[in-house]
């Protein structure tokens, strides 16, 4: 392999370097979680490009993990594509997400992926969170998403099933997520530039009062209700006086 051809390969934007020290020294976007920022070689999420989160879908805590990023002060729109459930506008607003710059997108597979690519490459979307549609994603589709996000300087976070870890990906950062307990998330590095795979941390996503499981039904006090007379059929109101019945006699003068 000639030196010129090697330099040509290294200059491509879709070439991943396992020990890219330059990439490791660039400042990333803070994730909002100190333990995760310490785990990532860039000190946070990459400023742009494709990030893969491998987790057992639908993985409800995933949106809680990205809330600080969606609520960040970076310019541009935010896009949530193909979420398993409709996000709560009230919860997003309380987390600081600017609803006037937020778009939730649903659609069939091919149209959804095309729309996400165009949005990521448009230079108007700062953060895009996409739950992968059903079926395997070809390597060419992943490469186009990554290049589109680099072109538009968009952070494109792609949630994929854990079995996708066996498939090569152009994403420089791949993390595996597990939910060991309600409101908690375990993060393990699968791949990142300038870092070692296998490093992990544990995050608390919800306050303690929201992480506690509700009490069992058997421990709740029973509801009490006034007993209904046996002669009164259920669901009926006792009949009142008839309009035809004679009323009380008026007093005589």
Image: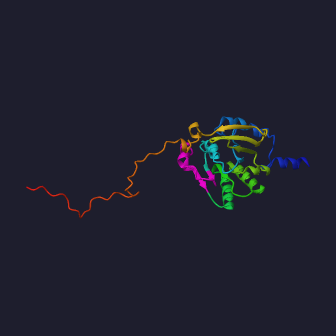
- Depth order, front residue of 194/166: 166
- Depth order, front residue of 65/152: 65
Query: Does 76 sit left or right of 164 as displayed?
Result: left
Q: Position of residue 174 (x, y in %)?
A: 74, 45
Q: Position of residue 248 (x, y in %)?
A: 18, 57
Q: Position of residue 22 (x, y in %)?
A: 77, 39
Which residue lies at the image location 85% right of the left edge and 47% below the top edge? 7
Query: Does 105 sit left or right of 240 as displayed?
Result: right
Query: Does 219 sit left or right of 140 as displayed?
Result: left
Image color mode: rainbow
Number of labels in the image equals 0
Residue 186 seen by the camera? yes
Query: Is residue 56 in the magenta section?
Result: no
Residue 36 seen by the camera? no
**Residue 118 quadrant:** bottom right
- Depth order, front residue of 125/80: 80
Q: Which residues are magenta?
A: 79-105
**Residue 192 quadrant:** top right
- Depth order, front residue of 197/69: 197
**Residue 112 quadrant:** bottom right
Which residue lies at the image location 68% right of the left edge and 51% below the top edge? 57
Q: Residue furthest bottom?
A: 244
Q: Residue furthest left?
A: 253
Q: Quadrant of the C terminus?
A: bottom left
Q: Residue furthest front?
A: 230
Query: Is residue 97 in the magenta section?
Result: yes
């Amino acid at each position: 392999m000639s030196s010129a051809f090697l330099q040509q390969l290294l200059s491509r934007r879709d070439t991943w370097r396992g020990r890219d020290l330059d990439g490791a020294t660039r400042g990333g976007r803070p994730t909002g979680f100190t333990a995760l920022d310490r785990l990532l070689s860039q000190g946070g999420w990459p400023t742009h490009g494709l990030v893969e989160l491998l987790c057992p879908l639908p993985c409800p805590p995933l949106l809680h993990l990205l809330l600080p990023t969606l609520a960040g002060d970076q310019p541009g729109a935010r896009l949530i594509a193909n979420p398993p459930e409709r996000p709560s506008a009230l919860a997003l607003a309380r987390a600081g997400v600017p609803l006037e710059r937020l778009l939730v997108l649903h659609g069939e597979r091919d149209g959804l992926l095309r729309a996400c690519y165009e949005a990521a490459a448009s230079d108007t979307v700062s953060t895009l969170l996409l739950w992968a549609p059903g079926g395997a994603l070809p390597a060419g589709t992943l490469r186009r998403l990554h290049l589109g996000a680099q072109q538009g300087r968009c952070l494109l976070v792609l949630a994929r099933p854990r079995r996708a870890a066996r498939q090569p990906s152009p994403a420089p950062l791949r993390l595996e997520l597990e939910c060991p307990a309600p409101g908690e998330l375990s993060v393990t590095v699968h791949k990142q530039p300038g870092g070692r795979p296998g490093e992990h941390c544990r995050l608390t996503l919800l306050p303690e009062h929201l992480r506690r499981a509700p009490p069992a039904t058997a421990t709740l006090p029973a509801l009490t209700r006034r007993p209904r007379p046996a002669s009164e059929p259920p669901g009926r109101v006792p009949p009142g006086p008839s309009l035809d019945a004679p009323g009380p006699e008026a007093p005589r003068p």
